[in-house]
Each structure stands twice: as C-alpha cells, then as structure tokens.
Amino acid sequence: MWESETESVRGSCYRNGVLSSSKHAVKTDGFELRGQSWYVATDIPSDLPVQVGDVNFHLHKYPLLSRSGKMNRLIYESHEPDLNKIVLEDLPGGPEAFELAAKFCYGIAVDLTAGNISDLRCAAEYLEMTEDLEEGNLIFKTEAFLSYVVLSSWRDSILVLKSCEKLSPWAENLQIVRRCSESIAWKACANPKGIKWAYTGKPTQVSSPKWKDLKDSSPSRSQPVPPDWWFEDVSILRIDHFVRVITAIKVKGMRFELIGASIMHYALKWLQGLIKDGQGQADDMSISSNSNSSGSSSWKGGLHMIVAGTKDDTPSIQAKDQRMIIESLISIIPPQKDTVSCSFLLRLLRMANMLKVAPALVTELEKRVGMQFEQATLADLLIPSYNKSETLYDVDLVQRLLEHFLVQEQTESSSPSRQSFSDKHMYEGTQMGNNPNAKMRVARLVDSYLTEVSRDRNLSLTKFQVLAEALPESARTCDDGLYRAIDSYLKAHPTLSEHERKRLCRVMDCQKLSIDACMHAAQNERLPLRVVMQVLFSEQVKISNALANSTLKDPGETQYQPLIPNRRTLLEGTPQSFQEGWAAAKKDINTLKFELESVKAKYLELQNDLENLQRQFDKMSKQKQTSAWTSGWKKLSKLTKMTTSEHHDIGPQIPTTADQNKKTPRRWRNSIS
C-alpha cells in the first residue's frame, strides 16, 4: 500500500500494513500467551518483567532499552540491581498496544491497521520511542502510516477517530483527532466520487432509506450520490468528536441546511426519545442508542440508557452524558433560520428541560424556536412542566417562546437590509417572518394550545389571560378559537366568580365571532349575561351591515368592494367547524334579501294606492265646495221636520222657533265656509 525509501535504507520495511525491523538482538519466533502472561519464545531467560493492567510480560532489557527512552529511565532511576517488576498503569492502549510495541522492539512483524494505529501511536509516545534512540523507531513508523495511509482514506479516518475515544488526552495532544477531523471534513465537502462509504456494514433496515438499494461499498456511476452520504458514518462518533468534525465542515463552507440535517440525524440516533409522539410524560421517554452503531470502545457507560421518572438515582451518570450531547448539539446548530425543523427544536427543548441543561443554552434554544414559531405544532408545544410547577404543562415556556417570536418579527420588520442579505442564503420559508400570515398561524396555534391547557384546573386565570393577550389584535381575524378556549376554561373552572368570568371574556372580541360561534355563545349559560348581550348585538350589527351592503347599487361599488377581501380573510381565519355553518348563514342572508325585496315591492304598491286615494279625496273635497247650498237646503228640510214635531208637543213656544229659523242660515254659512 505504501513504502518509504528512507525506511528501506535504514534497514526497516513496511509493506502492505506490515511493520518490521531488521535490527533485533534477541532472536525469537514470537510471543506465547500462558494464562494472563506473555512469554518470548526464546532460550534466553527473561530479565525484565513488565505489568500492564492485568497482563504480565516477561521480556528482556536490551530490546526494550534500545528503543524506549521511558524504559531506560525507569530502570536506571530505580537504582535496584534486581528489578522485580515494572508497572505501567497509565499506558495508553493498554496491554494490546504494549504487546505490539514489544513485538516491534524484538523485530517481529506488526500489522498496522486503522483499528490499532492510534493505540500504537500513543503507546510509542508514552514509551518515548523516538529517533534519538534509533532511526526508524516506532513513532516515526506510526506517524508515517497516519499521514500517508489513514488520512488519505475516508473509511480509515472514521475508524481512527472512533478508536481515539479511549485515548484522551493522548490523541488530542498528538493532533490525531484534529487531523482526522480535518480529513473527514475535506472529504465530506469534496466530490464523493471514489470514496468508499456505508462502510459500517449496518443492516438494511437500520441504514438510511436512501441507502437501502445499495449493495456495493461505493456508488455506481449511473446512480447519483445523495448529499447526505456522509451522515451515517459520521453519526457513529462520540459527541465531542462529532462536534469537531461538524466544526471543521462549517469552516470548509458546507451548506448550513446539510449541517442541520446531519445534526438532526445524529440526535435522532442517540436520543431516540426525540422521535416519539408522546404527550410529554417523562416516564414514556426512552433514550437509547442503537447497539449496532456502537464501536469497539465504550464511553463511561456509553449512551445506552433510559431516562425515566423513577425515584432512584441510578441513571444520573447516564443522564449526565445525555445532557452533554444536548448541550453540544445546541452549541453547533448553525445560526441561520430553518437550519433544522421547529419540531426538532421543540423536542430538543423538551429533553433539555427534563435533563436540566445549562440555562444559557436553554435560552438560546428558546430564541431559535421563536425564529420559527409559526412552524410549530400543538403536539410539540405540549411540554410537561419539569420544575415542580402546579400546572401540568409548561405554560411559562410557551409564553417565552411567543415573546421571542414577537421580538424576532419586530426585528425583521425594522431591518430590511438583513432580509436582502439573507435572500441568497436562506430558504423561501425564511421570509415567512414578515408575512402577516405567520402571526395568523401563531394565533391559531396559541388558541389551540389554550384550549388544551385550559382543562388543567391548576391553570390560573392570569396565565391564561396573559398568554391570550400576548398577540396583537391584528393577528386574529376570527376569535372562534379563543372562544373555544374560554368556554373550555369555564367548563374546567366552574367556581369562578362573576367578576372573574367577565375578566376572562375581555380577551375576546365579540365582533370577530362567526355566526355559529355567536349562536353557541347566545345559548351558553356559562358566559356572563353582559357578554351574551354583546354577542347578540354584534351579530345584529353584522347582519344589518351585510343586508345594507347587498342593497348597494353601482354608485356604492367603491364602498362595497373593500368588504370582499375582509370577508375572505375572515373565512380563512375561521375554523373548519364554523365554516360549515357559514354556508347555511349565507343561505339565510339570501332568503332575507329576497324577503326584503318583496317587502319593498309591497311598499311601492301601498304607496301607489295611497296616492290614488289622496287624489280621490282631493276630487271629493272640490265637489263638496261647489254644491254647498244644496247640502244646506237638505239640512234645512230636516230641521223643519224636527220643529214641526216639537210644535205638537210644545205649543206656546212658536215665536221662539221662528226666531231660531231666522238665525239658522247664518250657522250653516259658518259651517260650510
């Protein structure tokens, strides 16, 4: 695979991953393992016992002293002629690495692989096997293998970085972690043609869905390489090494949406509680890792754990590791909007509150949720209250998220220059913030959340009112959702006083209720009487306005047209259940219009009849004026008959009647005139 000319000159050779040295003082056929002890297969008795961990090595001084500076120092500084044993407790790589180093000292061929090169490199550094003692020593050999073989291979770089998990801080100090991270970052950002990927050998059902049909270790020429081809390989790394790789990838300029997708892939793999659709109960949240993805080394108990709401403190160490993962992921999420989904952020926030993540990081995560709050769902917002609060759900958290959303909306609306800069780098969804529809979606989301949490009897009226009034009035075109939340709160809190019920209903605008909501509110006995009257009055005003607008003719089109978009937005903001009643209401309005037209027609007919009667009356009055004397003579004849009849009864009063007959014509003139 690789051969150095310098090594061949110096008498050492490395071919096909086999490391050997032609210089050795003790001829041997190899090492023999007897129980927990290694012995050199030679006739010369051993004079240097070494203990590494639980394993004993019976070796000779000269091969080790000629190549290890640390062994020289330990032997000569002990000042003991008969040294019983050398104990190496903190040797990186353990007995396996020391075995390979000892074989190299004896000139036995050693196979270098991606699995043992990091252990052997750290062990050589620990044993101080430098070029000062002998040319072509173990440090030089292992360093050359790392530089020319491992770092040029995607697979080997991943495996070496994975093997460095148990070598801290040696691997960090020797720059193995940094160099492997840089190598992985360069290959992830470069053209993946020719790179062997999906090397982890995971079964088909566990692998990424995009890789299910791949049978070979490398993609075919006809099949395009997906942009997330490196996600699965990088996700097997420990969290601190994953952070190093992602940081290096950021520096290389990879698209932020791919970085966010890789972070989500890693989190869903190691924090499987994120993919559950539970309602937020800590007892149901299981956080475990896939056993197939674990490497040969474990990390302080690893990530195989279950965080449950039990009373014992056994999972405290494992919860600490989980908390470290969440804190690390929060710190490396790119700052751009829509890097990761809002649902992922809320689920991460749920676990962060449960595991008591650092408050500064939780605040940062809340701000990121506020940037994309219009994309949230009700199920993700139902986060339990883990801080021993009286309420079942964390209402204060949703209040803070809403405040961050409003601050972000105000910031984006006041800085248009930032939008022009982000147009080149953001998704189309990035510009949703300045769209008024974003506030409308958040208003519907908040109303649904209030309806859900209002069933909690421990929810105070103040918290309900503050959350309901947090959004501006323009965010809601219809208050049906808010009315449902108020009605649900009244059901769950039947002991509210009249003053408290009035205070609760103040958050609702009766003029923004649909017809179905008004009909329900008019029959709702839980509402205060004053609110019911306001609902009826507002409904009457809306019907009157609708009828008035329907009668407008051509001159009034300028006033009628602006009502159309408002009515459409009203329908968009009305829930589906009330939209069904809106169709029936429109039929009723059309029926009223028809009845109104018929009443108008009848009114016109009556007006015509009234005019005819008036004309007839005028004619009759004129005729009465022309025949006044004729009517007067008729009256005179009637009076004469009356006087004659009276004459038979009253005889001596004839002169008086004669005087009356003389005066009567004057009275007739006055009555006629």
Image: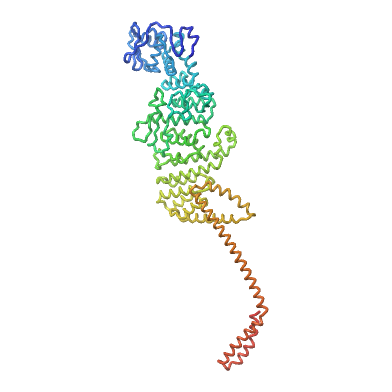
Left of 294 or right of it: where is 260? right
Q: Is residue 163 above or below residue 421?
A: above
How far from the left and from the top, in percent, is residue 221? 53, 24
Residue at 48% from the left image edge and 25% from the top image edge = 244
Q: Depth check: give the residue in front, 141 or 569.
A: 569
How far from the left and from the top, in percent, is residue 287? 40, 32
How far from the left and from the top, in percent, is residue 165? 42, 22
Q: In this orientation, does residue 507 appear?
A: no
- Picture quadrant of residue 171: top left
| Structure colour scheme | rainbow
Q: Is residue 608 above or below residue 488?
A: below
Q: Depth check: give the residue in front, 422 or 515.
A: 515
Left of 243 or right of it: where is 60? left
Q: Is residue 664 above or below residue 28?
A: below
Farthest residue toward the right?
626
Q: In this orientation, does residue 416 appear?
A: yes
- Picture quadrant of residue 269: top left
Farthest residue toward the left?
35
Instruction: Tally the numbered discs.
Output: 0
How far from the left and from the top, in percent, is residue 361? 46, 33
Farthest residue toward the bottom?
652
Quarter of the picture holding the C terminus = bottom right
Q: Depth check: give the residue in front, 258 or 475.
A: 258
Q: Depth check: give the residue in front, 378 or 585.
A: 585
